[in-house]
Amino acid sequence: MTAKPTSRFAQFAAYGVAITTSLLFLYPYWWMLVSAFRSTREILSAPLRLLPETLDFSIFTEIGRIGGVDLSTYVINSIVITTLSTLVGVIVTALGAYAMVRRPKAPGFTFLRYGFLVTIMYPYMLLVIPVYIVMYKLGLLGSYAGIILFLALGPIQFFLFEQFFRAIPSEVIEAAMIDGASEWQVLTRIVLPMAAPITATVTLITFLLNWSQWFPILIISRSPDTYTLPVALLSMNSELGSNFQGIMALAVITTLPVAILFLLAQKRVMEGMASGAVKG
C-alpha cells in the first residue's frame, strides 16, 4: 500500500522543520569556529560570514599564554581536575546511593537523600559564601584537592544511581545473601556488573558537567595556576577586551573536546538519563 500524498507531505514537512531547527542551533557553534580564523576587523565588518577569508592559525600561537600562565597548564588542569573529580564523584555517589537503597532507615539517610535532591535545584551562585568558608576551614582554598572535592558533589548522578538500584529485584540480592555472600560481594559481584550501563552513563554526564564548570573553580582558586580552560576563557574575555578572534579560538579549544565526546556518546547518555528517571 502506497502512502497517501498528504501523509508524505507531512513527513517531508516534519523533516524540513527538524533540519531547519538543527541548523539554527548549530549556527552559533559554526560561527564561533569560523571566527577563530578571522581577525577582529573582519568579524566586525562582516559578522554573518559563513566561511573565513583565510585559514590563519597564528591566533592559536598568540593565545599560548594567558594571564601569565601557559595555555598547556590550563589544558592539563582541565583534564586532571575533570578526570579525578569524575572518578571520585562516580564512586562516592554510587556507594552512597547503594547504601541508601539497602538501608533506607539508617540514621540521617533520609535527610541526606533529600539534601542531595534539593541541591539539584540549588544554584551555584548561592553557594559562594558557604563553600568559601568550608574550604577555608579545611585549608583547601587554592588547592587542587578543594576543587576536585567540590566538583565531585553530584546530586544528579546520585539520583540516577539510586533509581537504578531501586529497580534491581530484591530477590536477586536475597538469593545471593542466602548463598552466603557478604554485602561487599553482593555489591562487587552482582550489583556493579548489572549497573555497568548506568555507571558508564553517569561517568560521561559527570565528565561533561565538570569540564564546563568555572564558577566554583574561580571561587576556590587563589591563582591562575589552578584555573581550567573555562576559567581561562573568562579571564581572557576581560583581559583582551575586544579581541574576538582570540576569544573564539580559546572557546573552540574549550568546547571541541566535550562536543566530540558528547556526539560519540549521546545515545548512551540519553538512554541512561531516561532509564535513571524511571522508578523501579
Image: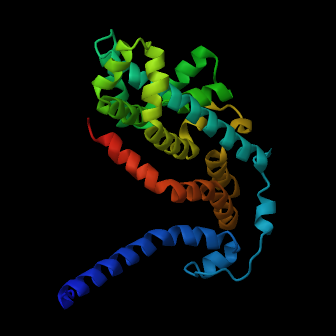
Q: Residue at x 60, y 15 (%)?
A: 138
Q: Residue at x 33, y 15 (%)?
A: 103
- Answer left or right for 275 relative to 230: left
Q: Residue at x 70, y 73 (%)?
A: 37
Residue 179 location (% of width, % of height): 39, 14
Residue 25 location (% of width, % of height): 44, 68
The extreme front residue here reads 179
> In this rendering, is residue 154 above or below 213?
above
Kindly tell me whether residue 193 is visible in this rendering.
yes
- Foreground: 211 or 19? 19
Residue 114 location (% of width, % of height): 31, 25
- Answer left or right for 246 relative to 149: right
Q: Residue at x 68, y 76 (%)?
A: 41
- Answer left or right for 96 relative to 169: right
- Answer left or right for 180 relative to 132: left
- Foreground: 191 or 18? 191
